[in-house]
Each structure stands twice: as structure tokens, then as C-alpha cells.
Image (cartoon, grey):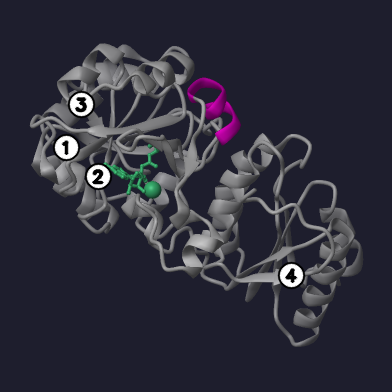
């Protein structure tokens, strides 16, 4: 199959192109599209055959449920069996936006979309292309991140093409995504709401709207050590993994820099080419000590503006795959706002290989 790539102006997308993409989805085909978080691989959420095609295109296990994207909150009652007050509060505060809520599902949502679960994940994205496409497609688009299973989520149409070209009908290119990490997922089927996946909408923001909010114990080290598995099936898989082994260096800033220099230098001495994930501030420090051309140093963003780190993280992980490195060392990014979301993705990419550099560390889980 030839994948058609269509460039769109994000704010004023061409109507005709959106209509064409909508027809692809209504006929049961697949079209990738931008959202404010990451690119999604869209199919008709109410058509089990489309869901099966999504799993096949991504190479994703079919017990991993899909998020249903809507463009109007009025579409929610048709697919959710129960609408607790917390759902209204979250929709008012954060929709359209990077927040997914889990609710008991209605019959209309096929098991193929919900991965056999009795619940459904729903999100109303903020991106104008996404919203118009959802409306042109019948109102309900099932969309996982548009990467091949195991690869970092795509933050540009080029990433989608790298992974899925030849496997889907169409890709809508709306430029780079704004947020760069997948939506926050909140489970509203428990008495106290539970964060199943941290994201741009952090726990503080949720608690201001809802009161007490729990973090899925399967996401924390304590939970893992006691054998608790994450409730969101997708959070159980190793993910985002670059082909070279990745280690995250935790600790007080000076100690991290010293440790990372030492590790990278000894890799070079052993004839290996190390990759380094640093901040804008620290990247020049490593560049100053490592012999030129013998390493790949990526500045991922500014710690004081941690949304820049979120935005660049997945692209950086992909660059290491193209960059021919033998081992990757990353600083930990335990920043106040988005540290939990960033560290969740980074530690997953590292398969939880952590090196403790020592010194004070404000742990990202607190
Ligand atoms: O930002 C996002 O959410 C992006 C864009 C495209 O909207 N989508 C996305 O979808 O990240 P995906 O499929 O890559 O991740 C969905 C996650 C998976 O971990 C899945 O297991 C979980 O949501 N999930 C979906 N339905 C669920 C349910 N009913 N109960 C628990 N977890 C669920
Ligand atoms: Mg995904």
C-alpha cells in the first residue's frame, strides 16, 4: 500500500483534504494525524475491523486498548455507561486538551477497541486538525500513538512515515507536536481517581480540580518491587527503547555531571561511541571534555522550562537510533512540573537501568 502524505496548515487545514481523510476512516481505513501531544494512528473506533488493522499496522498486542477521541463532549454519553461528577469537572477544566479519562463503556464500543476491557478511554484533543478530522470521520476515532510498537511516540509526520509508511492509507502532516508526551490518563472507575499515566496535566493540576488523586502504584519503584503491575496495559510493556543500552544517571547536579563525564570518557577509551542526553546548560560541559567526533551529545531542553524537555525527548531518543552510538547516558530530569511524566518515559526507555551518582536527589515520584 502506498501511504499518502498530506501537508496541512495546522490552524487553517484544507477542508477538502480533511474530508478525504474522513472518508478513508469511515470506509474502515487508517489515517495518522497530529494532536497536541503526539501523532495518533486513527481508525473508526466503532468498527472492530479498523481496530484490528490498527493493531496489525503497529505490531501491537491486541489486548492493549485504544483511546477513543471525540471532538464534542456531547458525544461522550453514547460510549460511557456512567458519568461521575469527577468526569464533568475534568472535562470543564482540561478539555479539549492532553487528558484521557477512563469510564465504564457502553455496548457501542467494540471489544476490539477496548482490548476486551469493560471500560473505555476517552479524550478530546485540542489540535484543530484532529478535531476537524474526528468530525469528518463520524465522531469517534480510535487512535494509539502512531509509532511502530516499541518505538518512541512520533512528534512529527516524518516519524510516522519512518515507522508506518506502506502500512496505512494516509498521514496528515500538521508540523511538530506542541507537548511531545502522550496524554495524562486518569481512571475514574475507582472511588478515588487514579493517574494511570503521568503527562502534561500533572497531579497538582488534577488535585486542584478533584481533591485527592492517587498515582497507580504499578508506576512507582515501591509498587514494582512488590510486584504490582500498572493498570493501563500499555504501561506494562518496555517502550521507546533505543537500540543502544540507555542508563539514567540520578543524583545531585554536580555529582551527575561528574559521573556522566567519567562514564562517557571511559566508554571512549574502550573504543565505544557514547551518546549523552543533557540539558541545554550542561551539554557544552560534556562537549568540552570529550574528544571531538567520538560521541553524540544531545541537548534536550531547558530545566527551567521543562516543557521544552518534554517536547524534545522522543525526537532525541529517535536521533540516537540514527546516530550510531554504542551506549547512551542520560541525566535524570526531575523537574517540578513535568518531571514525573518525563522520568516515566525516560526510565521506560532505559528499561529502568539507573546509576546513582550520589548526593541529594529530589525523587521524581514524590
Ligand atoms: O496523547 C495520547 O494519549 C495519544 C494521542 C494520539 O491521543 N494516544 C496514545 O495512545 O498515547 P496509546 O494507545 O499509545 O496509549 C494508550 C494507553 C495505553 O497504555 C493503554 O493501555 C491505555 O492507554 N488504555 C487505553 N484504554 C484503557 C482502559 N480502558 N483502561 C486502562 N488503560 C487503558
Ligand atoms: Mg503509545
Residue range of the region highlighted in magenta in the rendering: 203-210
Tell me what residue is drawn at x 56 percent, y 34 percent. Answer: 202
Residue 78 vs residue 3, the one in the foreground: 78
* Disc nearer the start of the sequence (4/3): 3
* Disc nearer the start of the sequence (1/2): 1
Instruction: From the image, state whether disc 4 or disc 2 is nearer to you.
Output: 4
Q: Which residue is mark 1?
A: 29
Above or below residue 256? Residue 25 is above
Mark 2: C-beta under 8 Å from nearest atom of ligand 1: no
- What is the x, y in percent for residue 162? 41, 52
Instruction: From the image, state whether disc 1 or disc 3 is nearer to you.
Output: 3
Query: In the structure shown, which secondary structural element does the residue marked by tag 4 occupy?
Result: strand
Query: In the structure shown, which secondary structural element does the residue marked by tag 2 occupy?
Result: loop
Q: Which residue is mark 4?
A: 356
Query: In the structure shown, which secondary structural element does the residue marked by tag 3 occupy?
Result: loop
Above or below residue 8? Residue 12 is above
Main secondary structure along the magenta-highlighted residues: helix
* Disc nearer the start of the sequence (4/1): 1
CB within 8 Å, label 4 to label 1 = no
Marks 4 and 2, how far apart at CA: 43 Å
- What is the x, y in percent for residue 268? 78, 80
Q: Which residue is mark 2?
A: 168
Above or below residue 119? Residue 54 is below
Q: Is residue 164 left or right of residue 173?
A: left
CB within 8 Å, label 1 to label 2 = yes
Give residue 39's quadrant in the image.
Answer: top left
Residue 293 vs residue 260, the one in the foreground: 260
Q: Which residue is mark 3?
A: 80
Q: Is residue 110 left or right of residue 83?
A: left
Marks 1 and 2, how far apart at CA: 8 Å
Marks 3 and 2, how far apart at CA: 29 Å
Amino acid at each position: 500500500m502506498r501511504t499518502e502524505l498530506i501537508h496541512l496548515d495546522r490552524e487553517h487545514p484544507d477542508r477538502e483534504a480533511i474530508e478525504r481523510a474522513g472518508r478513508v476512516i469511515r470506509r474502515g481505513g487508517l489515517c495518522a494525524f497530529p494532536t497536541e501531544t503526539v501523532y495518533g494512528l486513527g481508525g473508526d473506533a466503532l468498527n472492530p475491523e479498523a481496530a484490528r488493522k490498527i493493531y496489525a499496522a503497529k505490531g501491537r498486542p491486541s489486548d492493549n486498548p485504544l483511546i477513543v477521541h471525540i471532538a464534542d463532549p456531547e458525544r461522550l454519553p453514547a460510549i460511557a455507561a456512567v458519568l461521575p461528577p469527577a468526569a464533568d469537572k475534568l472535562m470543564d477544566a482540561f478539555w479539549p486538551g492532553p487528558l484521557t479519562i477512563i469510564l465504564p463503556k457502553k455496548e457501542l464500543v467494540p471489544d476490539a477497541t477496548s482490548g476486551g476491557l469493560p471500560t473505555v478511554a476517552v479524550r478530546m484533543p485540542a489540535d484543530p486538525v484532529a478535531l476537524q478530522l474526528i468530525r469528518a470521520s463520524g465522531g469517534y476515532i480510535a487512535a494509539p500513538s502512531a509509532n511502530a510498537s516499541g518505538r518512541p511516540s512520533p512528534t512529527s509526520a516524518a516519524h510516522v512515515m519512518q515507522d508506518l509508511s506502506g502500512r496505512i492509507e494516509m498521514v496528515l502532516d500538521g508540523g511538530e507536536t506542541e507537548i511531545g508526551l502522550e496524554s495524562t490518563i486518569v481512571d475514574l472507575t475507582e472511588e478515588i481517581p487514579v493517574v494511570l499515566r503521568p503527562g502534561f496535566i500533572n497531579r497538582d493540576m488534577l488535585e486542584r480540580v478533584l481533591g485527592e488523586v492517587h498515582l497507580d502504584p504499578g508506576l512507582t519503584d515501591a509498587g514494582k518491587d512488590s510486584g504490582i503491575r500498572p493498570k493501563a496495559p500499555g504501561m506494562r510493556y518496555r517502550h521507546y527503547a533505543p537500540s543502544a543500552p540507555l542508563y539514567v544517571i540520578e543524583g545531585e547536579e554536580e555529582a551527575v555531571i561528574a559521573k556522566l563525564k567519567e562514564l562517557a570518557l571511559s566508554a571512549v577509551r574502550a573504543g565505544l561511541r557514547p551518546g549523552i542526553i543533557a540539558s541545554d546548560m550542561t551539554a557544552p560541559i560534556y562537549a568540552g571534555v570529550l574528544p571531538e567526533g567520538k560521541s553524540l551529545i544531545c541537548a534536550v531542553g531547558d530545566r527551567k522550562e521543562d516543557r521544552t524537555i518534554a517536547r524534545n525527548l522522543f525526537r532525541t531518543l529517535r536521533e540516537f537510533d540514527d546516530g550510531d552510538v554504542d551506549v547512551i547516558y542520560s541525566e535524570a530530569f526531575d523537574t517540578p512540573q513535568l518531571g514525573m511524566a518525563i522520568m516515566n518515559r525516560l526510565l521506560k526507555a532505559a528499561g529502568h537501568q539507573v546509576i546513582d551518582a550520589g548526593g541529594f536527589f529530589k525523587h521524581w515520584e514524590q
